């Protein structure tokens, strides 16, 4: 098999973002397994920076793992026009084709990247694009749909209904999904089973060698009481405010010393009285080992988000031997909890209350749920399993047997 080009508009070894991290992990592990690959990107710093600014140096760079990164300069864009269209999409509104063209041309303007792909097409077996909604994915795949594979990270959102995507995606060679509900959504939207596009529910690779120490966490942070843990960004987009509200109601209605432990960045308004009483504890960012130790010490992890394409913290909780509680409004996390028999799900306060009661009153069964989850992760998302699936899929899609 010839080289595989992974395309994303910004790339860095430490930049934030779920798709960005997924790309780094996938390419690092494939490179370690001997797959010849490159990153094709722009000079933009990251998703939160000015998309007209060339922050990184143009040309060839190498990652710490020795992967080649090719960076191309961006040109000026009509930011006001893009922002006007994007604002409609963010509110959930559909847009007309003329607005779609503005969205896909004024997001990031990088003709040099597309020219390189056209000139060097024969050097690559496949181009892999992540995620679907970025214009580098659309404009790059449009050049060579039959050798284009997506790691799309689909959500049921206004962006997924853009008609230009519906025209292009069924022409592509392959789609790699993070979870079964994402694949089901994609089938409803694009009809891949009828188009000949090859698909696979891959998931995201996990380091299954986590060794947590619950006692160490309790000693280090002086925590004696049972607690629920939330790990991740603290903002309304992750529905953390609902968890805080339900927990506050729970401790009013129950004679319990249960606490809520929050880990990660971001800010959200917390009830001052419960913070003062140390019933809600916000630790912010902590070391990775401390995070694993905290997950192992918790009664369960609560992941209240309604909009996930995977969930690393759920997998981590299971690898640490603890069950999870997820929101029934998120098809992906609900499916993980059901498929693994590693957790429960809630849709309103009284379901949250009932699930919390069950976890606290059924310690052995809760521990078995955590073990079920651990086995599920090791069987499906260990890196050797994921790398093998990627290599087989790429060979199948490209037609290259070697």
Image (cartoon, helix red, strand yellow):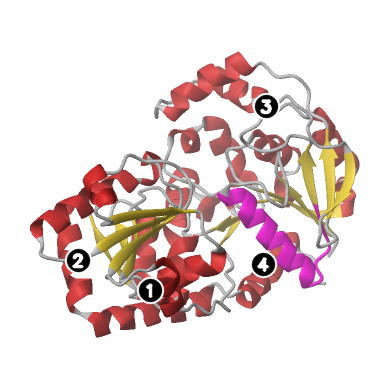
Closer-to-camera residue (272/105) = 272
Are the residues at dot 3 and dot 4 in contact (C-beta closer than 8 Å)? no
> Up-down: is 73 above or below 402?
above
Report whether 39 appears left or right of 215: right
Which quadrant of the rendered structure holds the C terminus? bottom right
Q: Residues within 10 Å of mark 1 (few under 14, many from 20)?
A: many
The magenta stretch spans residue 118: no
Q: Secondary structure at mark 2?
A: loop
* Of the two numbered discs 4 and 2 in the rendering, the one whose residue sits closer to the viewer: 2
Report whether 336 appears left or right of 348: right
Disc 3 versus disc 4: distance between alpha carbons?
33 Å
Q: Secondary structure at mark 4?
A: helix
Disc 4 versus disc 2: distance between alpha carbons?
47 Å
Query: Which of the marked residues, 1 or 2, is nearer the chain's N terminus?
Result: 2
Q: Secondary structure at mark 3?
A: loop
- Please give the residue where the numbered disc 2 appears in the rendered image: 257
Disc 2 versus disc 3: distance between alpha carbons?
47 Å
* Of the two numbered discs 1 and 2 in the rendering, the one whose residue sits closer to the viewer: 2
Disc 1 versus disc 4: distance between alpha carbons?
34 Å
The image shows residue 302 at horizontal and vertical percentages of 33, 60
* Of the two numbered discs 1 and 4 in the rendering, the one whose residue sits closer to the viewer: 1
- Please give the residue where the numbered disc 3 appears in the rendered image: 50
- Please give the residue where the numbered disc 1 appears in the rendered image: 297
Magenta segment range?
Answer: 18-38
Residue at horizontal 47 percent and vertical 35 percent from the top: 161
Query: Which of the marked residues, 2 or 3, is nearer the chain's N terminus?
Result: 3
The quarter of the picture where residue 367 lies is bottom left
């Amino acid at each position: 098999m010839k080289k595989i080009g992974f395309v994303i508009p910004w790339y860095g070894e430490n930049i934030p973002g779920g798709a960005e991290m997924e790309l780094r992990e996938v390419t690092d592990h494939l490179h370690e397994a001997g797959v010849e690959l490159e990153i094709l990107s722009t000079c933009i710093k990251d998703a939160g920076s000015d998309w007209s600014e060339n922050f990184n140096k143009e040309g060839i760079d190498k990652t710490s793992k020795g992967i080649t990164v090719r960076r191309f300069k961006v040109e000026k864009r009509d930011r006001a026009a893009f922002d006007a269209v994007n604002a409609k999409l963010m509110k959930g509104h559909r847009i007309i084709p003329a607005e779609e063209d503005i969205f896909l041309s004024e997001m990031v303007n990088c003709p040099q990247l597309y020219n390189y792909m056209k000139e060097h097409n024969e050097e690559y077996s496949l181009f892999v694009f992540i995620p679907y909604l970025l214009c580098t994915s659309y404009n790059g795949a449009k050049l060579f749909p039959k050798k284009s594979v997506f790691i799309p990270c689909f959500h049921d959102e206004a962006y997924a209904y853009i008609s230009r995507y519906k025209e292009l995606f069924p022409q592509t060679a392959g789609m790699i999904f993070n979870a079964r509900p994402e694949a089901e959504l994609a089938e409803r939207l694009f009809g891949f089973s009828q188009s000949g596009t090859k698909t696979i529910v891959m998931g995201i690779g996990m380091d299954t060698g986590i060794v947590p120490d619950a006692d160490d966490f309790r000693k280090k942070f002086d925590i004696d009481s049972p607690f629920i843990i939330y790990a991740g960004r603290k903002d309304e987009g992750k529905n953390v405010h609902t968890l805080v509200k339900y927990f506050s109601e729970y401790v009013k209605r129950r004679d319990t010393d249960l606490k809520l432990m929050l880990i990660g960045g971001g800010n959200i308004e917390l009830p001052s009285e419960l913070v003062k009483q140390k019933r809600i504890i916000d630790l912010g960012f902590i070391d990775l080992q401390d995070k694993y130790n905290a997950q192992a010490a918790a009664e369960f992890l609560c992941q209240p988000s309604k909009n996930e394409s995977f969930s690393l913290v759920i997998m981590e909780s299971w690898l640490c031997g603890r069950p999870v509680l997820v929101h029934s409004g998120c098809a992906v996390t609900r499916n993980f909890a059901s498929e693994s028999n590693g957790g429960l799900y809630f849709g309103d306060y009284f379901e949250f209350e009932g699930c919390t009661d069950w976890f606290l009153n059924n310690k052995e069964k809760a521990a078995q749920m955590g073990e079920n989850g651990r086995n599920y992760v090791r069987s499906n998302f260990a890196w050797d399993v994921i790398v093998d699936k990627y290599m087989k899929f790429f060979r199948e899609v490209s037609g290259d047997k070697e």
